[in-house]
Image (tube, grey):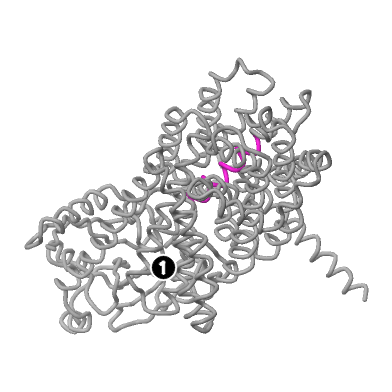
Amino acid sequence: MVGSAATTESHRARLGALALGALGVVYGDIGTSPLYTIKTAVEWAGGAVSPEEALGMFSLIVWTLIIITSVKYVAVIMRADNDGEGGILALMSLLGVKHDRRSFVIAIGMLGAALLFGDGAITPAISVLSALEGLKTPAPAIAPYVAPLSVVVLIGLFSLQSQGTARISKLFGPIMTLWFLIIGALGIGGVVKHPDVLWALNPAIGLHYLATHGMAGFLLLGAVFLCATGAEALYADMGHFGRRPIRVAWYGLVLPALLLNYAGQTALLVDRPAEASANPFFDLCPTALQLPLVGLATVATVIASQSIITGAFSMTRQAIQLGLLPRIHITQTSEESYGQIYVGFVNWSLMALTLVLTVTFRSSEHLAAAFGIAVSLTMLLTSILMFRAMREVWRWSLAVSLVVAGLFILVDGSFVAANMVKFFDGGWIPITTAAVLYFLMSCWAEGYKDMRTALERDTLPISSFIAQFRGKPRVKGTAVYMSSRSDVVPVPLLHNLKHNKVLHERIVLLHVETEQIPRVSPSQRVESTMLDDEFYATTIHYGFMEQPDIPRALLLESRSVPFHFNMMETSFFVGRLTIVPAGLSKWRRFKLRIYQFLHRNALPATEFFQIPPGRVVELGGQVEI
């Protein structure tokens, strides 16, 4: 009994620690949405709302949180994990591993990922702006300096990314816990003064608002949707914390705090709409405490932005491993946490776009239109993929799948349509960003596939090659040739033999395989078999969340390979290819030129796979596509 009680207590402590961590990483975005949701809704409604309109808005916000976050993500979508990992790319991989890879599924995954990259630039801008706009309540004269101050905060945030967040991230959970407790308490203060707002928990009030306000009510859904931005993070960050801690944090603290705060803001609008419409979130706070609240809000929005940036880094690594993006340099910033990485190109690109958005729009309500489109489209694409998962992974009946997924698609589609009306007011920015990224990813994926096909066309079976050179003189040492297949001769091997006239005593055809799962067990990392006459076919397996390290894998799993591996006696031969277009249409030729540019500027395979430069031999060649 004592041992059982100790185990239960240990389990609870671990669950509590994970839930605390989830509060700091998962809920930063959705947790700071009260800063701008009702404020934007009031602005879009004309700057002032009647008590009935305020209650209608609140009802719509409540049921948006319940349907999208509690039902769709927490109850349903989080069940679709890929060996514990979540996110739209993990969902795409889950469908790919269960069935043959389909271009439709891959296209949706790529577009969803592209939209999330755009969201990664908008979230820091709107979050920091909305926090610092709180300064205008106690100090109206500071209004012209909100955007410049936001720029300073954002530059500092992005500039510190290369240092990693391993140390300060331990504070994220406690800070966000304090944030939720305070915004919940502020909401209670407002509700106590006007408890009738709780009647708006009835969904009929929200539906009545939509029915009686026509197109204006429908368009207001674009602002209401802002309360659910960040819900995608519950699914995307599932691999870091697991389902249960995320659910415990959501139902135990986040959802109650959000509902209370939105209720408090609504009570303020009902009680004195004209006075509170400027910034109802900060008007809930006593004047003497508004400056400390602005400080806490700024820290909370920085944490929310940090989570989005880290997510963009993680998704970049996933996309590279899945063959959707060219190799770029990735730095591990923590020895303890594998998820702590830094991707310089992504960081500075996001910073540039974020600063442009901040300087251009200058306020959170102006930026809200651009924000909603990216997130709502991503959610719609996730719902479409979920229908596939319901049918093909969970084996739900067609009727049940249509009802459940159909409800999600209807809700998401409504929010997309409402946000699209603001397309020319800023919504075009994430759409354009996503379109460019999608085009680049499609060029890379298609070009890489065409190049591999052309290389395999220009080679010959490995069995014939071995038979042809059996018994011929060889030089000492081991030659490792990177190859996508073990049944054909790698082109660098043919070039080495043609130009240098040498064949090593041991030849390893090495293939690095990215599996459709997040991580591969060390016991299944390396597979190697001897083909014949000291020719070996070796495959190293990695998950799409792992960073390849070939020398480390071969050294650690030396017992799994049938040959003696000594780094000082091993040379790695890689090809540096020039692509020559031939017989292609103008459109295909244009896309191939884009691929050529990406291929030339991609991180060299040897650096990506962490092969020591002194052990690498590069052989040039041309391949005709």
User: Where does the image place residue 237, in percent across and percent down from the top left?
Assistant: 58, 57
Q: Is 308 colored magenta in this rendering?
A: yes
Q: Which residue is mark 1?
A: 514
- Residue 39, placed above or below residue 539: above
Residue at far top of view:
141
Q: Would you say the magenta stretch is mainly helix, strand or loop?
A: helix
Instruction: Give residue 583's quadrant in the image.
Output: bottom left
User: Where does the image place residue 293, in percent across and percent down from the top left?
Assistant: 72, 31
Query: Which residue does the image show at 41% across and 37% down from the upper left?
Result: 353
Instruction: Look at the image and give the residue range highlighted in magenta.
Output: 299-313
* Residue type of the residue flagged with mark 1: Thr
- Residue 373, placed above or below residue 186: below
Total labels drawn: 1
Query: Which residue does the image show at 83% across and 70% down from the upper left?
Result: 7
Query: Which residue does the image show at 48% across and 34% down from the upper left?
Result: 366
**Which residue is more in the foreground, 293 or 299?**
293
Q: Is 391 colored magenta in this rendering?
A: no
SS type, badge 1:
strand
User: Where does the image place residue 510, in percent across and percent down from the top left?
Assistant: 34, 70
Residue at far front of view:
212
Q: Quadrant of the N terminus?
A: bottom right
Q: Residues within 10 Å of mark 1 (few under 14, many from 20)?
A: many
Query: Which residue does the image show at 32% across and 72% down from the upper left?
Result: 508
The answer to whether residue 603 is left or right of residue 418 is: left
**Which residue is more in the foreground, 66 or 455?**
66
Instruction: Give residue 338's quadrant in the image.
Output: bottom right
User: Where does the image place residue 161, in percent across and percent down from the top left?
Assistant: 52, 39
- Residue 371, placed above or below residue 289: below
Q: Quadrant of the C terminus?
A: bottom left
